[in-house]
Amino acid sequence: MRFPILSTLLLGGVNAAAYGKPPVNDAPQVEKRSLDQIYKAALKEGGTVTLWSGGDERNQGDGLKTAFESAFPGMTLNLTVDLSKYHDGNIDQQLANKNVYVDSILLQTAHDFPRWKKQGVLLKYAPAGLDKIYPDFKDGDAAYYGYLGVGWQFIWNHDKWKGKNIQEFTDFLRPEFKGKLVLTYPNDDDAVLFAFDLIIEKYGNKWFEDLLKQKPRWVRGAATPATLIADPKSLYIASFTSAIGLGQQSGPLNFTFPKKGQHVTWAQTAAILKDAPHPEGAKLLHNFLLTKDFQKANGFWSLRSDVPAPSGQPKFVDVPGSDPLAFRDFMLDRPKVERLRFWFEDKLGTAQGLSPLIDGL
């Protein structure tokens, strides 16, 4: 989920005409069939759906694959997890080559979807349950929509840390955390970049200068900090650039959110490509994603207004200290994103290490 974009910058300027003009009569398809009827149509089509999902660990899609294939015997979900910033460029390449072989996309790169809609390459399709998705998180023509609310958390290992609670971004500057923080490169993940932008906006550059004096370990991938913090053999105690979900934690990790500082939440976005080779399979998947059962069990916030948040948490639109639409607006301002990325690259250097999907962490 995790959660950017040389390939997009290189390929994003491809003219919509390269993909053909959208048809004049392009009203959204509104699903009226039952889930069982869609399931039968998907089986008749071949029983396959190919999904590209944004994330930074290969196993991040295992739960979805298992749940989908268990719910629909005979269906195969061909799932590829990679960084959203790499998926989007490869999707652009498929579109440019008129060789689309992906059906469905679930990505963090919110700025891509309005562009793809304008180019006429997304299927305007309203799955059952789309009417329950909060209005601000869905396209008016059903070309794309949020399906999952996520956000960065303050995370620490309570087996390693028995001191004063972490409540604010300034707490990470305490002397006891020197050499024991692990953070994702902000110049390698736009959602992390936005987090640093919000923090510095509130606390100033001095906060970042003091953070560097803490000698944090910088890593690729937003899942990596939580992995290292959970490892009893590592020195690392805490991070604010990772997420472990909102449910009751059974392991050594605790989480919270800042009391005063602004923190990042966003809607992971879903769409079906218009030229998807398995449109019925893709429709089945998207109807499944918006079911109450999946929305309740996804581990984070539901984007359905009629599904409660995990126990003890506010609904996604009511999370204090966070504007879940702000990340989308940030992503749409590509000049600002690029300026910030280079500013942090100047301070930290380019992100070092293998892709988090293959680095063994």
Image: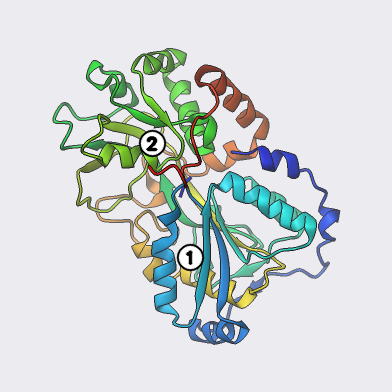
Residue marked by disc 2: 321
Q: Secondary structure at mark 1?
A: helix
The one of 285 and 141 positioned closer to us in this rendering: 285
Percent x, y for residue 335? 67, 30
Q: Disc 2 marks which amino acid?
A: Gly
Question: Vertically, is 122 above or below 258?
Answer: below
Percent x, y for residue 227? 32, 42
Pick the quarter of the image with the C terminus.
Answer: top left
- In this orientation, does residue 306 appear? no
Q: Is residue 317 left or right of residue 259?
A: right
Q: Residue at x 50, y 27 (%)?
A: 197
Gap in angstroms between the C-alphas marked 2 and 1? 24 Å
Residue marked by disc 1: 132
Q: Residue at x 36, y 23 (%)?
A: 216
Around disc 1, counting alpha carbons within 10 Å, would you say few (fewer than 14), some (14 to 19), or many (20 or more)?
Answer: few
Question: Vertically, is 139 above or below 31?
Answer: above
Percent x, y for residue 261? 37, 29
Q: Disc 1 marks which amino acid?
A: Lys
- In this orientation, does residue 2 appear? yes
Q: Residue at x 53, y 34 (%)?
A: 188
> Can you tell which quarter of the image residue 212 is in?
top left
Around disc 2, counting alpha carbons within 10 Å, would you say few (fewer than 14), some (14 to 19), or many (20 or more)?
Answer: some
Indicate which disc, 2 or 1, sits on the residue closer to the N terminus. 1
